[in-house]
Amino acid sequence: MTATAPRVEVGKLDAIDQAALVARGEVRPDELVDWAIERVEALNGPINAVVAPAFEQARSAAAAGPTGSLAGVPMLCKDLLLEIPGLGFTEGSRYLEGNVSTFESELAARFRRAGLVVVGKTNTPEFGMAPACEPALFGPTRNPWDLTRSTSGSSGGSAAAVAAGMVPVAHGNDLGGSIRYPASACGVFGLKPTRARNPLGPNYGDVVGGMACEHVLTRSVRDSAAVLDATAGPGVGDPYVAPPPRRPFLAEVGADPGRLRIAFSPRTPEGPMGHPDCLAALDETVRLLDDLGHDVVEIDADWITEPAGAAIGTLVNVAMSWIVAYWVALMGREPGRDELEPASWALREAGDQVTASSYLQAVEQLQRFTRRVAVALRDVDVWLTPTLSTPPLPIGEMCGTVDDPLRGLVRGGEMIRYAGIIANITGNPAMSVPLVWNAAGLPIGMHFLAPFGDEATLFRLAAQLEAARPWADRWPSAGIGEGAAP
C-alpha cells in the first residue's frame, strides 16, 4: 500500500465497515482518526466544509480507546445547536466569534458513547436560517460535485464533507429541510427523524414548537440507521417523546418493505412544476418504484394554503427573534449591526414585531395544517416528491445584501419549493435519497415522507432503492474518488 492508500481506501468505507475493522483488530481507532484528519487536510481547502478542526481532541479521544457500536469511527459535527466542551461554537455568526462551548449536549454524549470520534465542526449559515451554507463569518461551502455550486443548507458543511469522503458520518439538524436539502445537493443520504426521536437537551426541550430535529448525514442507509439506534430516545425531562420503534432501526435495513402505496406529486405545494431535471428524476424514480412492485399513484399536494404559508412566515421570523434573544442573554450584550448578516437582522426585526397572540394563532394554524396533511395521506404509506425544485444553484445567488436583505431567502425559496418544511410542521419522518444525477453531473435527491413515527418504512424502502440503484461508487471530482485529490 502507498502512504495515501489507507486514507483513501478506508475513507471509501461506510461507518459500519470502519467499525468492523476496529472490532477485528485490523485497524486501531487512532489510525482511523489520523486518516480522517489527513483526508480533511487534503480535501477541505476548496470545499470549505470544516471550519473548526478538533484534531488534537480527536486524537486524545481515539487514544483513550473508545467503545460502543461504532468505536473509533471519525465524524464531524455541525456548528449549530450541538455543543461539545472546549470546541468553538459560533453557529455561523460573527456575533459569536470566539465563543467556546462549556457543556456537552445530550446528543453529543450519545455520539461519544457510541464510540464516534469528533474530528471537527462543519460550516452552517448564520444560525442555520438559510437554505445556503454561505455565512459571512467563514465563507461559502462549495459543492464537491461542482465547486461553483451551492451545497444548499443549513447542514451544507456536513453534507459536503460526507460526499467528499472526509468522514462517513456527519451531524446535521433540520428545522425546515436542513438535513434533506443538502443531502440532495451533495448526493448523500439524509433522514429527518420523527419529532423528539433524538434529544435536544439539556438546553432545549424543543426548538420552534418542535420543528427542529437532530440526526446525521451518511453515504449508506445502514449507517443512518445504526447511528439512530445509538442516539434515539428521550432525554431526562424532555417535554414529549416519539413512539418507540418495534425493533432496532438497523434491523429494518434489508427487510422486505412489502408492496407500498406511494403517492407522488410533480407539482410543488404552491402549484408550479419543478425544474425539468427534477421532474425527469421524479419520473425515473416512479418507474423504478413501479418495477420494484410498489403501487404508485399521482396526487395533488396543494396543502399549503395562504393562511398556512403566513403562519410559516410568522414562525420563521419569531425563530430568528428568539435565537438572537437567546444569545443576547448569554453574551450579555446586543449584537452590533455589523455582527449580524442583513437577512438575520431583517428577520429579527420582523420577529420582534410579532405579538404573543399572533404567534399562538400561527401555531394553531399549523396544527390544523398537520391534520389536513394526515387526512390527505392516511391511505398511502409514503409521499414522494423531488427534494429540491431546482439543481443546486450557483454560489452567491442565495445571499442577502444591505439594500435587499431578503434577496437570498427569496432566491433560495425557488430551490426548495417542494416544501420539506412540511415534515417539520407535522413531525413526520422524511428522507432524501440520492437516486439520480443530471446531465451536468449534479445529484438530484428524491424525498420520501412517511407517517408519524414510521422511520422503519423509510429505512426498508431506502435500502431497497440503494440495492436497486447503488450510489456508493459515485464520487465527486473534489472528493476521494478516482482522479480526485488524494
Image (spheres, rainbow, N blue to C red):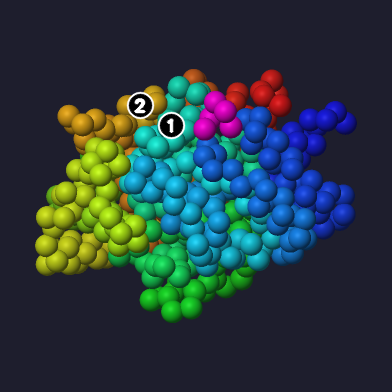
Query: Which residue appears farthest toward the bottom when viewing the image?
Result: 237
Whole-number angstrom distance, CA of label 2 to CA of label 1: 8 Å
Instruction: Say the numbered circle drawn on residue 140.
Output: 1
| Quarter of the picture holding the C terminus | top right
Residue 381 percent across, percent down from the top left: 44, 58
Query: Which residue appears farthest toward the front when viewing the image?
Result: 332
Looking at marks 2 and 1 on the same chain, the residue that comes earlier in the sequence is marked by 1
Residue type at mark 1: give it.
Pro
Q: Secondary structure at mark 1?
A: loop
Q: Is residue 321 left or right of residue 215?
A: left
Residue 250 percent across, percent down from the top left: 64, 61
Q: Nearer the viewer, residue 448 or 421?
A: 421
Residue type at mark 2: give it.
Gly
Q: Is residue 284 left or right of residue 72?
A: left
Q: Decide whether residue 285 is among the magenta residues.
A: no
Instruction: Say the numbered circle drawn on residue 396.
Output: 2
Q: Nearer the viewer, residue 265 or 92?
A: 92
What is the span of residues highlighted in magenta in the rendered image?
A: 44-48
